[in-house]
Image (cartoon, rainbow, N blue to C red):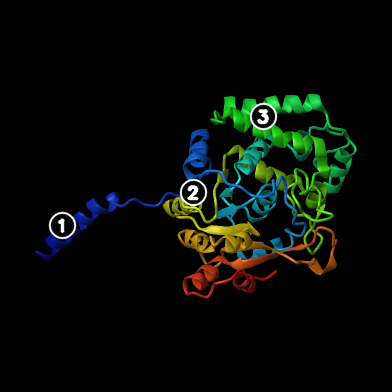
Amino acid sequence: MKTVRFLVCAAALLLVVPSIRAAESLPSQLTDEEFWKMIVDFSEEGGYFRFENFLSNELGFQFVIPELTKVTKPGGVYLGVGPEQNFTYIAALQPKIAFITDIRRQNMLELLMYKAFFELSPNRGDFVSRLFARKRPASLDDNSSAEELFTSFNAVKPDPLLFKKNMEDLKGLLVKDHKFRLTDDDLSNIEYVYRVFMEAGPDIDYQVGGGFGGGGSPTYMDLMTMTDRDGTNRSYLGTEANYRRIREMQVKNLIIPLVGDFGGPKAIRAIGQYLKDHDATVTAFYLSNVEQYLFQDGAWRRFYTNVAAAPVDSSSQFIRTINGGNAGGLRSFGMRFETLLGSIADTIQAFQNGRVRYYQDVINMSHP
């Protein structure tokens, strides 16, 4: 009789188990439809920021990468804000998928411009040629250093005809091939951003477009030829391997640009739910100095509440930027900012326990 009851219970369990929805693993690729739907469904209305932020102004952002690669695990999920600096962190951390969220819709569109040029360019030389609308010097090959790459392009004048062709190719790829539903205003905005890149070239810096980065803001060339403290260039254009790692993720639609406020009601929470649904955890969350503005605007509590809804573990790291860094005096121009690491789990626990009240509290929990 006991045997019969056991078999009945076991059979009942077998009937119940299939109805429990198991978490899906992270995809190895997203379809164009899935990619665009994620941008639309996860994003919020675009907001205002005082600077255009065509590129980073944080020259020492590579300094934390050696420590990051020690304490984090590859194959997770990268979160970030802003434009190109994310590619360098992604190349180093090797996540399976990445989400880049910025309050400015223009940033999302700039990242789609990057996506198109990655897909159209099999190597760094072709990519930089497209990014700045300059003909590729014949001397460059896959073994060229970042310094050789940018020094060569710096000597080349912008080509308006190449700009026009590249813009047509970009539209063809994003709209006709991928069928992303970009509006006429979106395409005009992308063309505006691209024209800024063409006109400024590799000397583009944070002050282009009216941004105030202080005297001597680093140029694109400075950012790409900078190294970590040990002299290793870890930029996404530092090596062909780094470039191809990002290009492969772009081709597979695995770097998703979103529009959202860190303290907003939707974007960060939507990412967190997606990670829960796919049994994934945050590897790193690059914040730049957004927390500083969140504390000024009183939105910091909403932000940490949003992050608390995302799955993290003991290795998950915030990457923060603070004013006043000097990086030991190394290449002091453009080194007004210092990059710090901090445990996401510890920060959230401190917030929930009432130990976070001021911006300085989270800075005190961080380290170079």
Helix, strand or loop at mark 3: helix
Decide which of tag 1 and tag 3 comes sooner along the chain: 1
Q: Is residue 120 left or right of residue 143?
A: left
Which quadrant of the structure image shows residue 12?
Answer: bottom left
Image quadrant holding the C terminus, namely bottom right
* Tag 1 near tag 3, CB within 8 Å: no
Residue reaching furthest to the right: 155
Q: Is residue 131 visible?
A: no
Q: Which residue is mark 3?
A: 170
Q: Position of residue 80 (x, y in %)?
A: 61, 53
Q: Amino acid at mark 3?
A: Leu
Label 3: few (<14), some (14–19) or many (≥20) C-alpha neighbours in 10 Å? many
Q: Position of residue 278 (x, y in %)?
A: 45, 51
Q: Which residue is mark 2?
A: 26
The numbered dot on residue 8 is 1
**Residue nearer the viewer, 197 or 207:** 207
